[in-house]
Amino acid sequence: MVEQATRQASDQFEHWLRQERRVAYGEMLRDVNDFQMKTAAVVSHSYRTLSEVEALQALEELHTAHITLIQRVGPLATVAGNGVFTGFRDYVAQCRRLFTALAGCTPENLPVEALGAHYDALNDLNGTLVASVATEMQTAPTAGGGGN
């Protein structure tokens, strides 16, 4: 009877954790996609002539998307498996490196090559992150691949 109750509690916890992860990972991937799109816009803007207002708006939108990613770190840490959390942490660290490269830049002197390199690195990290989410969602939360 104790074994059955223990197993039932474990099953309920795994179901709850899977549901929480599904929601958290979906929100995280939407935010990462938003950041990717805004980074692509800034990189694209850096290759062509834009008004200063348009360039500043693109940079402001990128900054807002970055803040959203940073705000997601805490809530994600409470439910994410190690692989996903590590992948997200690495992605956010690359975002910070991007903003370090942008520090002190104006729309007229955006570092085009550096922006392209950061964008490529973000794309690679995004691919790793998506693969981690797929792996964790296909295994039990407390199994070897997705547990904390």
Image: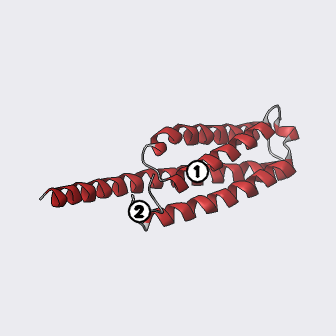
Q: Does residue 103 show up? A: yes
Say few, some or many: other residues with alpha carbon within 10 Å of mark 1 (under 14 / 14 to 19 / 20 or more): some
**Label 1's element?**
helix
Along the line of sight, which residue is nearer the eye, 126 or 62?
126
- The residues tagged by marks 1 and 2 sit, at their Cα atoms, a distance apart of 17 Å
Q: Amino acid at mark 1?
A: Thr
Is 64 rendered above or below residue 25?
A: above
Which quarter of the image is occupied by the N terminus? bottom left
Along the line of sight, which residue is nearer the eye, 112 or 114?
114
Q: Position of residue 73 (x, y in %)?
A: 53, 41
Q: Which residue is mark 2?
A: 143
Give the residue displayed 84% in from the left and 52% down from the top.
Answer: 47
Give the residue displayed 59% in from the left and 53% down from the top.
Answer: 87
Q: Position of residue 28 (x, y in %)?
A: 51, 50
Q: Amino acid at mark 2?
A: Ala
Quarter of the view holding residue 52: top right
Q: What is the residue that sits farthest to the front in this orientation?
A: 2
Q: Nearer the viewer, mark 1 or mark 2?
A: 2
Q: Position of residue 20 (x, y in %)?
A: 37, 51
Along the line of sight, which residue is nearer the eye, 132 or 143?
143
Q: Which residue is mark 1?
A: 86
